[in-house]
Image: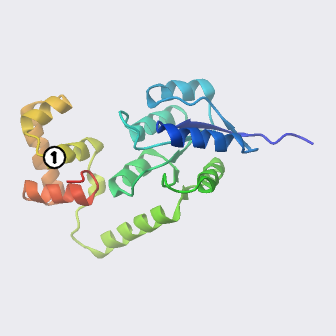
């Protein structure tokens, strides 16, 4: 009898207790092999060296932009599949993840069995979304279809989302310029462009938009 070829899984997660628990659970899976686990700073190099079949990544890890990291991995390794573990249901995060090529989505609070199901599904070249994420995406799509004049948030870039977040926190143009390594004039130009895209006339409305999209909890 031939041994089953195992799915090679790279786990990118930095929350200590949960990370350890996931590692232990993966060790008990007969059809999966858990590869080296480290923080996001070495992920691109690890994928290159270890050639996993599936990368399971926490999209809320501190200190790293793991959606952009996933995009880089997928551009260099198109055969790798990515399962994202978002902590909360934020539409802008889901939209960015979809555009990056991530094919599996499971809420972090979901059970281990669902993570395993997602891994097996994407490994078979299919997309997996847990039921709650499916509902959020479906409701968002229906809402956009039913509202003729609703701005298309998908037209915003990740840099523009970050600028909205900083503006909603009350940062000045000078502070944002220093934070994003751009000029003062560029901040003002991009702010006007963002507000034009969203058809928003004031910073107060922009802050409300940031809260609604989960960019800030203010």
Residue 80: x and y in percent read 58, 39
Residue at 23 percent across and 67 percent down: it is: 150
* Quadrant in which the N terminus is drawn: top right
* Quadrant in which the C terminus is drawn: bottom left
Residue 153: x and y in percent read 27, 57
Residue 44: x and y in percent read 49, 28
For label 1, the residue is 169
Total numbered labels placed on residues in the image:
1
Query: In screen coordinates, is 155 left or right of 205?
Result: right
The residue closer to the viewer here, 114 or 94, is 114
- Image quarter of residue 34: top right
As drawn, 83 above or below 137: above
Query: In screen coordinates, is 164 left or right of 44?
Result: left
Residue at 60 percent across and 56 percent down: it is: 114
Q: Residue furthest front?
A: 17
- Image quarter of residue 81: top right
């Amino acid at each position: 009898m031939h041994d089953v070829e195992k799915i090679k899984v790279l786990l990118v997660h930095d929350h200590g207790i949960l990370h350890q628990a996931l590692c232990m659970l993966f060790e008990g899976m007969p059809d999966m092999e858990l590869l080296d686990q480290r923080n996001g700073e070495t992920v691109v190099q690890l994928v290159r060296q270890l050639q996993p079949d599936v990368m399971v990544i926490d999209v809320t890890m501190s200190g790293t932009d793991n959606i952009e990291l996933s995009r880089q991995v997928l551009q260099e390794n198109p055969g790798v599949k990515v399962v994202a573990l978002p902590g909360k249901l934020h539409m802008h995060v889901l939209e960015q993840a979809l555009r990056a090529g991530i094919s599996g989505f499971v809420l972090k609070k979901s059970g281990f069995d669902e993570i395993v199901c997602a891994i097996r599904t994407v490994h078979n070249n299919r997309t997996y979304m847990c039921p709650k994420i499916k509902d959020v995406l479906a409701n968002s799509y229906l809402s956009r279809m039913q509202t003729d004049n609703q701005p298309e948030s998908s037209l915003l870039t990740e840099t523009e989302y970050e600028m909205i977040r900083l503006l909603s926190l009350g940062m000045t143009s000078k502070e944002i310029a220093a934070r994003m390594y751009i000029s003062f004039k560029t901040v003002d130009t991009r702010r006007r462009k963002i507000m034009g895209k969203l058809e928003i006339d004031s910073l107060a409305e922009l802050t409300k938009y940031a809260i609604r999209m989960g960019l800030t909890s203010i």
